Image (spheres, rainbow, N blue to C red):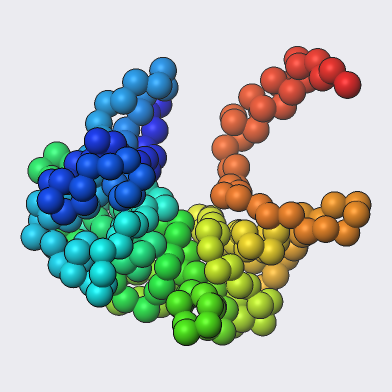
């Protein structure tokens, strides 16, 4: 019933010698656990976590000048059960600026894994097996002229056992020109099928377990304009769908 989310921390969790103390001069991204009633249970600066784990250079040594947004957390994925490569209570934190996945254990304040690889400016992370995660790999790069996606965005799978990466439905995503410079979501279902939200172009693609496109949705209005989508989800709980329908039937809409 609790929620994990990314927040901005102020006053900053870092020494003022590093980031100052003026509000708005530094994005001190934090991970925050909130109860159903809105009470903050836990909150910690991700930059502070990095420094605690001797990754000072990743926060303050990668750029030629001070960067006010060195982490940019865009997803916090909680681990809900023990597995061979993680423990219940661990977090998988996506850092967009670092193009890195931080596997963090709040109980011990330990970064268990710091994952970098063939992905860039990624977003959504999901646990898809007891040893694999899926990463919405925007595949976006800051070139001399502008931010660009090279070829297309990808769904990158990382295997904790082999420590290797692979691409899911690589040819299908390329053929269907799935490109999202920012944001984006992928849901891999138990049967291997997958929904992909191409946020920037207001499009959802659904592929069957063989990677063939089953259907496509474009968020287009009657005036012809296409509008952004944001963090779509597949609802595969029959009980949740039933509760939603029951609530809808009992609710009177006022025009």
In the picture, the quarter occupied by the C terminus is top right
Question: Horizontal placement of 58 versus 52: left or right?
Answer: right
Question: Horizontal placement of 75 versus 82: left or right?
Answer: right
- The x, y position of residue 161, in whole percent, is 24, 68
Q: Which of 145 and 181 is in front in this view?
A: 145
Question: Horizontal placement of 52 versus 219: left or right?
Answer: left
Q: Nearer the viewer, residue 108 or 19?
A: 19
In the picture, the quarter occupied by the N terminus is top left
- Residue found at x 25% / y 74%: 64
- The x, y position of residue 7, in whole percent, is 37, 40
- The x, y position of residue 53, in whole percent, is 10, 56
Picture layout, residue 113 above or below residue 118: above
- Residue found at x 29% / y 47%: 28
Q: Nearer the viewer, residue 207 or 104?
A: 104
- The x, y position of residue 21, in whole percent, is 22, 42
Picture layout, residue 135 above or below residue 29: below
- Residue found at x 16% / y 54%: 18
- Residue found at x 13% / y 46%: 15
- Does the image show residue 11? yes
Question: Horizontal placement of 201 versus 63: left or right?
Answer: right
Q: In which quarter of the image is residue 191?
A: bottom right
């Amino acid at each position: 019933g609790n929620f994990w989310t990314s927040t901005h921390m102020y006053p900053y969790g870092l020494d003022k010698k590093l980031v100052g103390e003026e509000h708005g001069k530094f994005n001190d991204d934090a991970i925050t656990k909130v109860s159903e009633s809105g009470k903050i249970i836990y909150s910690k600066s991700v930059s502070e976590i990095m420094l605690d784990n001797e990754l000072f250079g990743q926060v303050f040594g990668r750029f030629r000048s001070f960067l006010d947004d060195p982490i940019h957390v865009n997803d916090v994925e909680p681990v809900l059960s023990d597995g061979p490569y993680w423990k219940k209570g661990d977090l998988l934190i996506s850092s967009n600026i670092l193009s890195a996945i931080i596997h963090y254990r709040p109980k011990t304040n330990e970064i268990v894994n710091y994952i970098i690889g063939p992905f860039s400016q990624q977003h959504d992370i999901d646990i898809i097996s007891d040893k694999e995660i899926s990463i919405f790999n925007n595949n976006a790069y800051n070139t001399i002229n502008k931010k660009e996606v090279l070829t297309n965005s990808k769904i990158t799978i990382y295997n904790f056992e082999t420590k290797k990466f692979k691409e899911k439905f690589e040819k299908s995503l390329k053929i269907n020109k799935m490109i999202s410079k920012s944001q984006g979501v992928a849901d891999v279902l138990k049967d291997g099928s997958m929904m992909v939200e191409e946020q920037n172009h207001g499009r959802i693609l659904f592929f069957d377990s063989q990677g063939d496109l089953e259907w496509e949705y474009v968020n287009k209005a009657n005036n012809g304009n296409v509008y952004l989508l944001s963090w779509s989800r597949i609802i595969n709980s029959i009980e949740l769908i039933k509760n939603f329908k029951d609530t809808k039937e009992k609710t009177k809409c006022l025009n």
